[in-house]
Amino acid sequence: MSVLNESLIREVVADVLGKLDGVGAVATPKPSQAPSTSADKPACSCQSRTVSGETVPLRGRFGVFQDAAEACVAAQEAYLQLQKKGMAARRKIEEIVKAMADRNAEPWGKIEFEETKIGRLDHKVAKLQIIKLVPGVDWLRPDGRSGDHGITLEEYTPFGVVGAVTPSTHSIPTLSGNIVNIVAAGNAVVFNPHPGAARCAAMAVRAYNEAIYRETGIENIACTIEKPTLDSFNALCKSEQVRLLLVTGGPAVVKAAMQTGKRAICAGPGNPPVFVDDTCCTTRAARAIVEGAAFDNNLLCIGEKEVFVLENTADKLMEKMAGFGAVKLNSQQLAQLTKAAFSFKEGQGGGCAHASVNRDFIGKDPKVLADAAGISLPPQTQLLFAETDAQHPFVVEEQMMPFLPIVRVKSVEEGISRSLEAEHGYKHTSIIHSHDVENMTAMARALDTTIFVKNGPCMAGLGLGGEGYLSYSIATPTGEGITNPRTFTRVRRCVMVDNLRIY
């Protein structure tokens, strides 16, 4: 990773945030950035669209809108423009987003980190640099068949406008990957981002739209609400232009999306367990567990959240973890951290079933957790861990902190059973470290998760160290899995009877 130019980034942050404070959300582009012809002027406050016979003014600029209804109308127009320009325009937009995400990874990662104040800066940058792994237009391949009675072609066709909700944990990366997938499929998109990351989302949307308009002439292919609220989310869901919803977030927003009556693709919560048996390479397992759980301070929904390990392997595993930058807490330090990291309902005696995570600790550096635990950390500490029982709040809750509970189990059967219990039936992600194929098979069948990683860190499930492709929206509640361009399409069949057959 290259060294960041702090003074340059501070200037970028100040400039971007200053622009976004204005009523229009963004400033007028410099003359050198503007389209070259008078016929292709960017969106302005006097622009309007005709919808259902009514003239609707659009008060957004380069995809950033105050009003959700206006954003949806603008996105519908962009979808129609994209239809006319065809696959070449889709491919061009894919190329633009991937190139810009990589080129701007450092300043944009810094901007997101400054706004959200969670995770790790170097990993914010890394998550943007890998947008190139998100699949695009080439993912859409029609299926043709012929026989005695003619030829049939099935192809993937767009819905129109997709309404999307993005999280604060990976705001620009999720938004960027969603644009690649959704536009590659032929759609436009309107984002209602998490309020805690709305400014950086607006900055990225504006930049993408400026570049896309210069290169293709298409306006507002990706829109966002400058100041997202529950009302703007409801307006997005009710809009007649929005034909499909994509929600990446917590249980509450997923539940709301699934109750709208519209088709919803939902990327919900996860609490990924790790099971370590006595056939694995403990050095490899320890390295992978620390690498995965420490990534972006454990903000990833696929990240290792709790470890179940056979008794005869536990001490060796923990010793190896300490060698890879993890620090073990004793029981007293664990108790102090637990008291600070969770709140408990009165009268419940601190029972883990009633614990809720203290948001002040989510995505924070290990030092913040260590201070709460009353311990000083050596330099370069990546992760904290401690031994707990299977009902501890750190096991039961999706806590998203650089801390791992380690639970000893007596048998493979118990390890798999405990993993299933901790995963809560989300069917999101699970991980095993084993060289026994039967143990791998047993866990895969029992947990039935969307992602199942064997002998690697969680990121391998998204193509980072393993084979496969990347997406930051993993649809577990609704079953689409790791989203790709086909996720955002309908299948359309075209039939020619008796003719054009090749048999």
Image: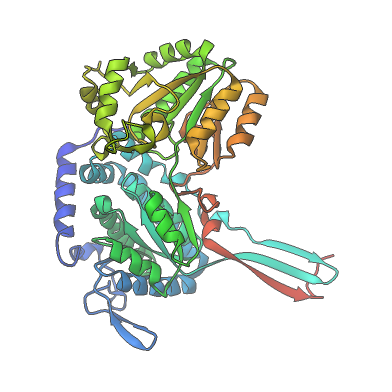
Q: Is residue 11 left or right of residue 349?
A: left
Whether residue 429 is visible: yes
**Residue drawn at 47 percent across, 67 percent down:** 261
**Residue drawn at 47 percent across, 62 percent down:** 90
Residue 140 image position (x, y, % from top left): 58, 58
Image quarter of residue 71: bottom left
Instruction: Please say if 323 is above or below 59.
Output: above
Q: Residue furthest front?
A: 347
Q: Is residue 443 left or right of residue 400?
A: right
* Image quadrant occupied by the C terminus: bottom right
Q: Is residue 176 left or right of residue 492?
A: left
Whether residue 464 is visible: no
Q: How is the image coloured?
A: rainbow
Instruction: Please say if 393 is above or below 221.
Output: above
Q: Nearer the viewer, residue 89 or 77?
A: 77
Q: Is residue 416 left or right of residue 404?
A: right
* Image quadrant occupied by the N terminus: top left
Q: Nearer the viewer, residue 203 or 413?
A: 413
Residue 119 image position (x, y, % from top left): 29, 36
State how many labels appear: 0
**Residue drawn at 32 percent across, 73 percent down:** 69
Residue 60 image position (x, y, % from top left): 25, 70
Image quarter of residue 65: bottom left
Instruction: Please say if 320 is above or below 25.
Output: above
